[in-house]
Image: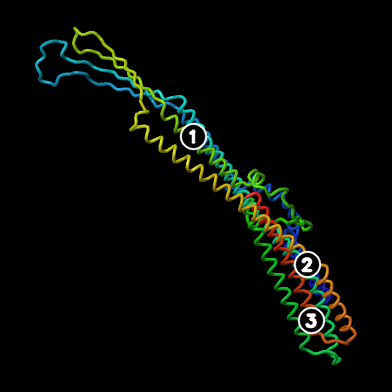
Amino acid sequence: MNCANTENWKYMKQLIKYSIALLVCLPAGVAAQQAPVLSLDTILQRIDRNNILLQSYGLKAESYKYSADASTAWMAPMVGVGTFMTPYPGQMIMDPRDKGNIMLQIEQDIPNRAKLNARKRYIESQGNLERATRDITLNDFKAQAKRLYFNWLIALQRINVLQENEKIMITMKKIEEVRYPYNQSQLGSSFKAEARIEENRNMVRMQEGTIGKARAWLNSLMNVQGNELFGIDTAHSPVFARANNYDTASLSLIRKDVLKMNENIGAMQLNIESMKMQKKPEFRIRFDQMFPLGSSMPNAYSIMGMISIPIVPWSSKMYKSEIKAMQFNIQGMEKEKAAMLQETQGMLYGMEYEIRTMQKRIQSMEEKIVPALQKTLDANFISYQENKMQLTQVIDAWEALTMMQMDVLDEKLKLYEMIVDYEKQLYR
């Protein structure tokens, strides 16, 4: 009876352990199942919508709108109260008229409306510069996100290759362990196979680190916590899409930095127009009201209108020189833009040629070299199973195939990064 109770107790303890283990693993399993799979387009859209730095450019552009409205405001009127022609204390006053006056003064500057509107247009143009800067930053972020996404994609493919090849090595190790008691294999071969298996697993761990890094950085770009779990579309395969035309006129319409330069030139032209308005006059009006301290004097007032004369040589020199300087600056920027477009044209032709060459190289590796090495490994493995070949020879073939498969994936990653660089340069 005691033995039966002991057996039941052991069974209950095992059941409790399994239940606890299941409860511990269940949240992780549920989280893994709920982790969404994000396509590259979805990630790029979230970066565009949620990235904090990109949001800052929109806020800065909005601020220029209000600054432009503020630039059309008039100066506040000036009001003063004091005495006018009032004698010092202790002076002899011969006539009540000599007692002086209490004076109220009101003064208002009246700006030139054309000047205000020109200044407003210039300030508003600064908002367009911020939006153009945002487009450049977004293009950089998209290129960075694509690189991370493709590194993740290639890391998954590497893991898949390593895990498949590990199965072959595990099989050979087991065969060695079975043969060793019958003196049909060497003990060192089994240890060598075990070392290769562990090296393979270390390479898998390295790729898992690459995936974790890519996930954290992508989360940062999307403005979410770095440890947020999600997966990627493993079926995605980057395709090289050549631009329809490399002429400088077409490039000037799609490159973000050229568009920003155009906005900058436009802003400087508006600033020139604003500076030209400096030759227009401004106005001021002043009203003075006198309240005499003597009873024999009537109340009196004074109204004065004033106008500035900015066309005089000592005043016009300032805005004329500024206009000349900005005109030369615009000419320099036009030359810089032309040089940039010319350089981009040459770079795109060179990058396209490099991409085409890499595609042919990868095709050759995938269609000729890898199949040949796979056949070599298969043939050696069959000979090994028939005990006609040593394990070390099979391991050499296995290592050659694994290395070539890794080389193919390395070249694919280089190709994908070339495509990213091409697109970044095209739309930069």
The residue sitting at 10% across, 12% down in the picture is 94
Tell me the element at label 2: helix
Q: Is label 1 or label 2 in front?
A: 1
Sequence-wise, the earlier of marks 2 and 3 is 2
Tell me the element at label 1: helix
When the figure is inspected, residue 275 is found, relative to residue 423, above or below; the finding is above
Q: Residues within 10 Å of mark 3 (few under 14, many from 20)?
A: many
| Residue found farthest to the right | 386
Q: Which mark is residue 403?
A: none
The residue sitting at 72% across, 52% down in the picture is 40
Look at the image and tell me whether residue 48 can be seen: no
Coordinates of residue 212 in the picture (x, y in percent) = 67, 62
On the image, numbered disc 2 is attached to which residue? 160
Tell me the element at label 3: helix
Q: Quadrant of the N terminus?
A: bottom right
Which amino acid, mark 1? Ser
Sequence-wise, the earlier of marks 1 and 2 is 1
Q: Quadrant of residue 37?
A: bottom right
On the image, numbered disc 3 is attached to which residue? 395
Sequence-wise, the earlier of marks 3 and 1 is 1
When the figure is inspected, residue 27 is found, relative to residue 295, above or below; the finding is below
- Which residue is nearer to you in this view: 195 or 278? 278
- Which residue is nearer to you in this view: 188 or 377? 377
CA distance for labels 3 and 1: 73 Å
On the image, numbered disc 1 is attached to which residue? 67
| Residue found farthest to the bottom | 183
Q: Residues within 10 Å of mark 1 (few under 14, many from 20)?
A: few
**Dots 1 and 2: beta carbons under 8 Å?**
no
